[in-house]
Image (tube, rainbow, N blue to C red):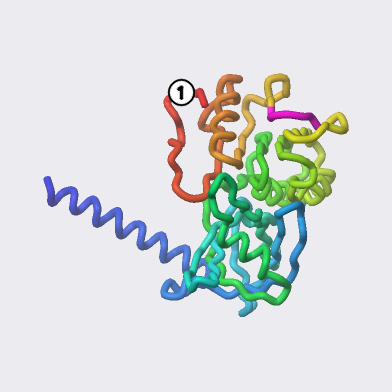
Amino acid sequence: MRAAWDEVYWLFGCSLIAEEARLYAEAGTDPDHPWRPHRVVERVEEARDAISLVLEPVDGHILPHRTGQYVAVAVDLPDGTRQPRQYTISSASGSAALRVTVKRVRGSDGAPDGQVSTWLHENAHVGTVLDVSQPAGDLLLDDSDDALVLISAGIGITPVAAIVDDLAQRRPDRPVHLFHVDREPETHALVADVRDRAQRLNDVRALTWYSASEAEGSAVRSGRMDLADVELPQTARVFLCGPLPFMQAIRGALVARGIAPERIEYEVFGPDRWARQPKSGAA
């Protein structure tokens, strides 16, 4: 029995090694040197404590990516440590450069500030060279005709921005529902970018909630996101991105309204401690 399990593990390990090699080959990356230098060619102040960095490879070789993927960015901190962090590519595939949007993490209740996000906000300017990994991630935009429901909170808007950018270029006819919640307009990153590209879509419905400010306009509401009275197509594909408690609550609400669990995708950066398909639809 032990020999049989050894064979299973060996075959599984070989499969993973082969898949890793394939990904490195597709990206033109040396597996012994997975980090590739990218230069910041543009920096945009998106919102309070949120910036976008447009990155181009120093060697001119573009990293191919699919809409919805992320990259890791590694920086050398003042204490001598080297720290990587993952950031969604907030622009569509096919562009000559990668755009990442970084929220500055400020510590509270005794927790320290985010080391890498703080470093990037203070040091990443046009001309700065950063080490960037090959793109990865499986929260990918498909090419079906199903309606899309894109639900985000805070900096979770980054994959939504990439998806809307892609649809505006390739599939403006695909029905899209955009739901986002933020603290206030001043913290709402990429809002102008998403609105501009959404205007190019033929069938789009958008609604925003601000939890700490008064609402203005028919498409803006105050308080927490509430989808109870919002029209939702039962056969839509749903993308969730935001803090884990937010996604758990929204997923529970969607399942309660009849959206099949397998049609709900989500993105968690770091260890995923939430099962892909919880036993019940409750948050």
- The reply to whether residue 76 is visible in this rendering is no
Q: Is residue 126 left or right of residue 258?
A: right
In this view of the protein, which residue sits in the foreground, 232 or 11? 232
Q: Is residue 144 above or below residue 66?
A: above
The residue positioned 83% from the left and 32% from the top of the image is 215
Please give the name of the residue rendered at 63% of the width and 40% of the height, measured from the top-left corner.
144
Element under disc 1: loop
Quadrant of the rendering where the N terminus is positioned: top left
Residue 3 appears in the picture as rendered: yes
- Image spot of residue 272 (x, y percent): 45, 44
How far across and down, in percent of the image, does residue 170 sit? 73, 50
Q: Amino acid at mark 1?
A: Ser
In reply to whether residue 254 is colored magenta, the answer given is no
User: Going by the picture, which residue comes out furthest to the front?
Assistant: 110
Residue position marked by numbered label 1 in the rendering: 280
Q: Position of residue 142 (x, y in %)?
A: 61, 45
Q: Residue furthest right?
A: 217
Give the residue at the far bottom of this rendering.
Answer: 59
Q: Where, by quadrant of the figure, is residue 119 drawn?
A: bottom right
Q: Residue at 55% of width from left, 25% of height from top? A: 252
Magenta-highlighted residues: 220-225
